[in-house]
Image (cartoon, rainbow, N blue to C red):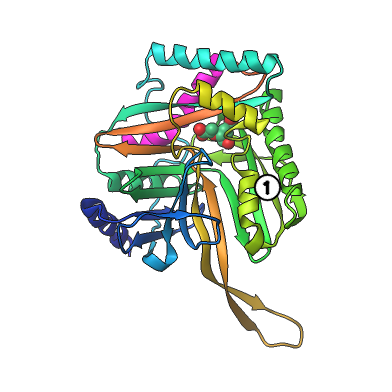
Amino acid sequence: MEQGLLPELRKLFTSKKAPFVAYRKPGDTKVFLRVQHNSTTYFVENFDESGYVFAAFNSERKKYLIPTQYSDVLEFEFQEISAENDVEVAIEIGEFTSDIDQKNYEVLIQKAIDEIGQGKFKKVVLSRKEKVELADPDPVAIFKKLLQKYKHAYVSCWYHPETGIWMGATPEALLKTERNRFNTMALAGTQLHKDVGEIEWGPKETEEQSLVTDFILNQLKSVAEVKNIQAGKPFSKSAGNLLHICTEISGSLNAIKGLKKIIEALHPTPAICGLPRQKALEFILENENYDRKFYAGFMGELNIKTEIKRNSNRKNQENRQFSAIVPKTDLYVNLRCMKLVEDFAHIYVGGGITKDSNPTSEWIETLNKSETMKSVLVK
Ligand SMILES: C=C(O[C@@H]1C=C(C(=O)O)C=C[C@H]1O)C(=O)O
């Protein structure tokens, strides 16, 4: 079976006739390949649709959809893991950036710190794009390496004639719904992975992550269809060569009516935009000086009918298996991602800025984040 996925993808990349997406969920060994039957462009209008959605950071843009009714899904088993572990860093840091890139980024960060100091907003997530020449421009080989290397990430490879090729290995879930349950997460704060010793987080990281948790909880409270909101304890979540602070949040939801509202309440969270949301967004649009496109947008399964089997082991009853078909939604934030453009990868990376940020440390953080992609591109 493992042989099947890569040749299938290679055929699709050779013809590039219709949109398709291949993805593997965190910790899973199944890779799904959804291929559209035609080359028509479809969009999500109100989140009642079923299919695979691919949405830009900017919520005002149209959200692409590969509809269930116009696509087929193939399922492959992919169990290979690379000899290197998730953590290993393959290349020299800063190899693809210049002093000018660093200077420009640090000036941008300082401007944000100054405006935060003036009380204009509390947090803003700033980002940049890095161009890396591909040692091997074969998208299938790159996707294979992402699958092998990042078994704990959501690894995806999207192609649409209007968007081009996007790939990534994201640690961040946006929203999962099944029946009347939903899950989301507040993910922020970054440090390099540690093999030994206790993981410690400084006040800057703890504060920037708790801003995300508080925002999500408040937003959820404002959605009438959401009930029984619960938040776990923050923990350190590993993501390739990095660690983040993560709080898992769950609750119940009237899924059919509430999906659009809950997605709009969550996206964009302060993990990728800032706080207050509108002020931070304005700063990003005016100052970042480039188009994020699908970076920090979201993607994933939307209202996909899935068979759920449960063993019921009640007293005085034989073991019985119940099975039901329910629509599931499983969306992720498009981070640690890149767009492949001919012989180059455009890598998108950013980080959260608060009053305690240091411009040079923020620059280094983006270099560390870009390693997730660079380590599968070079060599
Ligand atoms: C913005 C990115 O990541 C987000 C920002 C983080 C931070 O500021 O520490 C951590 C995880 C993500 O929520 C990115 O990967 O580009």
Residue 214 lies, with reference to residue 11, above or below; the image says above
Residue name at image x 67 percent, y 18 percent:
116
Quarter the C terminus occupies = top left
Quarter the N terminus occupies = bottom left
Residue 336 lies, with reference to residue 310, above or below; the image says above
- Which quarter of the figure has residue 207? top right
Membership of 157 in magenta stretch: no
Q: Residue furthest right?
A: 228
Give the labeled residue for mark 1: 248
Along the viewing direction, whichever of 154 and 68 lies nearer the viewer = 68
Taking the image as shown, residue 354 lies to the left or right of residue 139, namely: right
Q: Is residue 195 visible?
A: no
Which region of the structure is painted magenta? 359-379
Q: Residue 94 appears at what percent x and percent y?
A: 40, 20
Q: Residue 24 appears at what percent x and percent y?
A: 45, 54
Taking the image as shown, residue 264 lies to the left or right of residue 134, namely: right
Along the viewing direction, whichever of 332 and 287 lies nearer the viewer = 287
Q: Residue 112 appears at what percent x and percent y?
A: 60, 18
Magenta-colored segment: predominant secondary structure: helix
- Image quarter for ligand 1 equals top right
Q: Amino acid at mark 1?
A: Glu
Marks counted in the figure total: 1
Along the viewing direction, whichever of 316 and 105 lies nearer the viewer = 105
Residue name at image x 29 percent, y 62 percent:
4
